[in-house]
Amino acid sequence: MSTEKKLYAYVRQEIVPLGQAHLHVSDLAIQRGYGVFDYFRISEGRPLFLEEYLARFYESARLMHLPLPLSDEALKAAIYKLVGLNALAVSGMKMILTGGYSDSGYDIVAPNLLLLQQPVTMPVQALQERGLKLITHEYVREFPEVKTINYAMGIRLLQKIREQGADDVLYHHKGIVSELPRCNFFLVRQDGTVVTPAHGMLQGVTRKHVLELATKRYPAVEATVTLDDIRQASEAFLTSTTKRILPVVQVDDMVIGAGKPGAVTRQLLEDLVRFEESHHQNQVPGE
């Protein structure tokens, strides 16, 4: 997390220089990997879709029995204060809520809240033109509806991904596809229908926006997606906060469609960029 610019972080109700942002070893995030987080982008001091990301953060915290130490208003005030201090043109902010400093190393106590802001780089054009190769792995996250800090499987698979010359991994269970470690998955059927898995994955904010945008141009549904559906698809792509939309041209040995990014994927990316720009322009800084 090194950077030339001096950055600040929010840790346990204090804003401190990033280099001084620490948690005690008794925290359940360290002892047991227990905690939740969320992440949103910031452009020119304006968080994108903050209310939607906060709603998901609050829901993750509720499902994991982690009461936030700040009110909604106080949390937003801390976010904007940190954004003002760091003064980054384009960045991302991670909100982390841990199980707290537990004497037993097991029981939840007073949760600790962290806000970390870092510069972010969006995908280069070369990735849009080339498309991604994915491998598959049979796995379902323990709490797929919760954005937990547990990314053990995704991180463990990084070596396998690199060895196979791939870019990422797509999870499935008995052939039913769910998600990637940090992205949602979409495909385009031969009849032009845009489809994304309906169950077993995190409800991504970008996923939601893309699905809404897709309904304005194409048939679009949430449904069961199988590995066989991928084999028969004309296009596929992934979505996330920092990647927006990236085309997928191969999954394992399955070349998708013509083996290159498709027209539906390109059109939806254009629509998403316009949607984000419109939201940004209509936003009042500090609100």
Image (cartoon, rainbow, N blue to C red):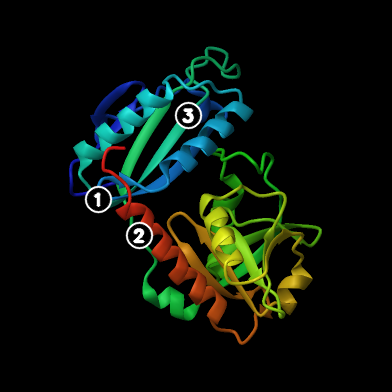
> What amino acid type is highlighted by mark number 2?
Glu
Disc 3 and disc 2: Cα gap in Å? 30 Å
Q: What crowding class fits label 3: few (fewer than 14 Cα within 10 Å), some (14-19), or many (20 or more)?
A: many
Residue at screen point 61% across, 39% down: 146
> What amino acid type is highlighted by mark number 1?
Glu
Q: Name, please, the residue furthest toward the bottom.
A: 258
Is 193 on the left or on the right of 161, as rendered?
A: right
In the image, residue 131 sits, relative to residue 223, either above or below, namely below
Residue behind mark 1: 44
Residue at screen point 47% across, 29% down: 97
Q: What crowding class fits label 1: few (fewer than 14 Cα within 10 Å), some (14-19), or many (20 or more)?
A: some
Mark nearest the camera among 3 and 1 is 1
Mark nearest the camera among 3 and 2 is 2
Residue behind mark 3: 97
Residue behind mark 2: 277
> x%, y% of residue 192?
67, 77
Q: Earlier in the sequence, mark 3 or mark 2?
A: 3
Q: Quadrant of residue 51?
A: top left
Q: What crowding class fits label 2: few (fewer than 14 Cα within 10 Å), some (14-19), or many (20 or more)?
A: some
Q: Earlier in the sequence, mark 1 or mark 2?
A: 1
Q: Which of 212/202 is in front?
A: 212
